[in-house]
Image (cartoon, rainbow, N blue to C red):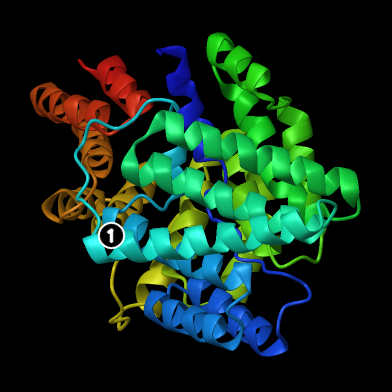
Amino acid sequence: MKALRGSRALACGVLVAAVAAPADANPASAALRAKASAATYNLDHDVAMATFREAIKADPNDSGAYRGLATSLWLSITFRRGNMTVDDYLGRPNKPTSSPLPPPPPETVTAFRNAIETAIGIARKAIDANSRDAEAHYQLGAAVGLRASYTATVEGSVLGAFRAAREAYLEHEKVLSLTPQRKDAALVVGTYRYIVATLSMPARWIAYAAGFGGGRERGIQLVEEAAAYAGENQTDARFALILLYNREKRYDDALKHLTALREAYPRNRLMWLENASTLLRASRPADALRILDDGFARFADDRRQRMFGELALWHYKRGAALTALGRVEAAAELKQAIANEGRKWVHGRAHVELGKLALKAGDRAAAREEFRAAIPLCESDNDQAWADEAKRLMP
């Protein structure tokens, strides 16, 4: 069972579930889905859910409309938990956090299950009618892939998520075999191939035996093909590439997609945070601070619901940029990050930055206090790299 824990990463493969739908769906439903998808990417979750429900009324047999609703419901849970950023997926993908997450609202869970099971049922019925229907196989793979992500991230069930992830992968491989030109199916296949390549060897062999393929470079190439393909999941592929490029330290490539997505979805505050985070990883703190200041000013009057811990995250990123630049305002920003409700890894990293400032000021006792505070916070929230950094810097 220890090796099976690696399969949790497979279930989380597509971080932003595809909201594409059948090419031959009702035109009214298709238009509503496009509107709902734009609302999703702009963080207008209530509008997105309401519009997906309108799409379902327009075409009750549109599997993609039900899946879009399920996606919005799932994202509302992750938004409430504060685990929607690239930082959350740069650590060890097979190690769950020990930091407790709030349970999802029961009505949201029920609505998600109803929507995703309906989407799956419609797709299976279409396959029963025509086993070579590539669109039906695409819809089934996308729906069970979303169920896999939900099962892993919300329910914490490794085995259930693994089974669904396997079916999603095989269904989209089937799409590519039936219609090789459909590069939208390459998103799921490529993402899972990449993740398999990052697993420990025992977990990798389990994945191979279950039918998954591997290959780090091939996985990235497939996701790139999906991002270049004018399908309805093109935006999802771009989000996936941002994560993969950050993991591979291909920061300039990630920044190109981030710039395009900021322009396409100007109401999405998290795009400014992600852009700045990538710039910080690329050792460009001045550019990161410029983006963060722009985001602060742009969204100062935004009264929409915040992601859990979002304000702490903004302050931490600004504090990290200011620390790297040697600015005196850094400590105040980092203390604001700790004072605001947030994820433990955010608070832990803020303590690390404060420890660096104390070391620079020659206060070894204060530095030790900050690093000691950082280590358990980071370790409890799957942020071992920063816990190790605190240990390394401990005077």
From the viewer's perspective, is residue 15 above or below residue 392?
below
| Residue 87, quarter of the rendered image | top left
Residue 371 at what x, y percent from top left?
19, 26
What residue is drawn where x is 41% and y is 78%?
298
Per the image, label 1 sits on a secondary structure element best described as helix
Residue placed most toward the observer, 102 or 240: 102
Residue placed farthest to the front in the image? 129
Does residue 157 appear in the picture of this structure? yes
Q: Quadrant of the N terminus?
A: top left
Question: On the picture, is 292 further left or further right than 183?
Answer: left
From the viewer's perspective, is residue 215 above or below residue 54?
above
From the viewer's perspective, is residue 20 above or below residue 90?
below
What residue is drawn where x is 68% and y is 27%?
212
Q: Which residue is mark 1?
A: 80
From the viewer's perspective, is residue 111 above or below residue 56?
above
Residue 262 at what x, y percent from top left?
57, 69
| Residue 295, quarter of the rendered image | bottom left
Residue 72 at what x, y percent from top left?
44, 67
Does residue 223 appear in the picture of this structure? no
Residue placed farthest to the top in the image? 202
Question: On the picture, is 249 further left or further right than 297?
Answer: right
Label 1: few (<14), some (14–19) or many (≥20) C-alpha neighbours in 10 Å: some
What residue is drawn where x is 48% and y is 70%?
69
Q: Amino acid at mark 1?
A: Arg
Question: On the picture, is 202 further left or further right than 289?
Answer: right
Residue 171 at what x, y percent from top left?
71, 44
Q: Quadrant of the C terminus?
A: top left
